[in-house]
Amino acid sequence: MTSRRTNGSGWGGRREGAGRPANLDYFEALAIGAKADRLAERWATRRAHRNIRQRLKATEYFELVADANAVPIKERQEWLHSYAAEYHSDDIDGAIAYLGELESRTASRLLSEPVTQVYGSRRRVIRVVMRWAAWRYKTDVTESRVDRCWKHYRKVFRRELD
């Protein structure tokens, strides 16, 4: 049979001064969560932009620009006044018009990319933010603490949006 301490010097519980002292205050923890969220968003946005650029490189427009850039610089002035340059310019105008005339659904699929978190980046984000927080607040912050701060920030931020 176990006995419970009932006097005021108990081991834990909710009382003044009980438990381990916090090494971060509430706003520092929110700042850590915000930093992690911004970093993850930045990485996801970069990935989406890179995917859009790769998709656009596959279009005729970029091939035409590459053809024009292939003309040596010394010969470019003469080339610009030739029939080939005029024909090339018409092709570029046509390619741009074609991109503009695509069905809106197809064009939006071509020029947009969903911004989703990069696979496997959560742990990298947490480690980067962990080093930043250690530098910024001059205290050790564990991976689990950064993760909890990030989740709490997302919870608070979503509640404010509703």
Image: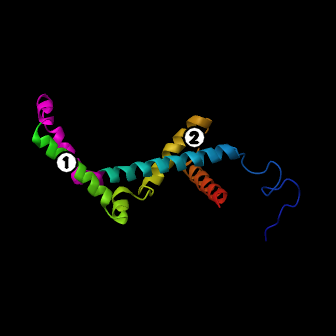
Q: Residue furthest right?
A: 7
Mark 1 crowdedness (10 Å alpha carbons): few <14, some 14-19, many ≥20: few
Residue 126 lies in the magenta-colored region: no
Q: Which region of the structure is painted magenta?
A: 54-81
Residue 35 at x, y = what percent? Answer: 55, 45
At which x and y percent is residue 87?
14, 46
Q: Is residue 103 visible?
A: yes
Which residue occupies the extreme bottom position in the image?
1
| Identity of the residue drawn at 38% across and 60% down | 108
Disc 1: which residue: 90
Q: Quadrant of residue 71?
A: top left
Identify the element where label 2 is drawn.
helix
Dot 1 amino acid type = Asp
Quadrant of the frame with the N terminus: bottom right
Which of marks 1 and 2 precedes in the sequence?
1
- Vertical placement of residue 33 versus 70, above or below: below
How is this picture coloured? Answer: rainbow
Indicate whether residue 80 is drawn in magenta: yes
Q: Could you tell me residue 120's position as x and y percent?
A: 42, 56
Three-letter residue code for mark 2:
Ala
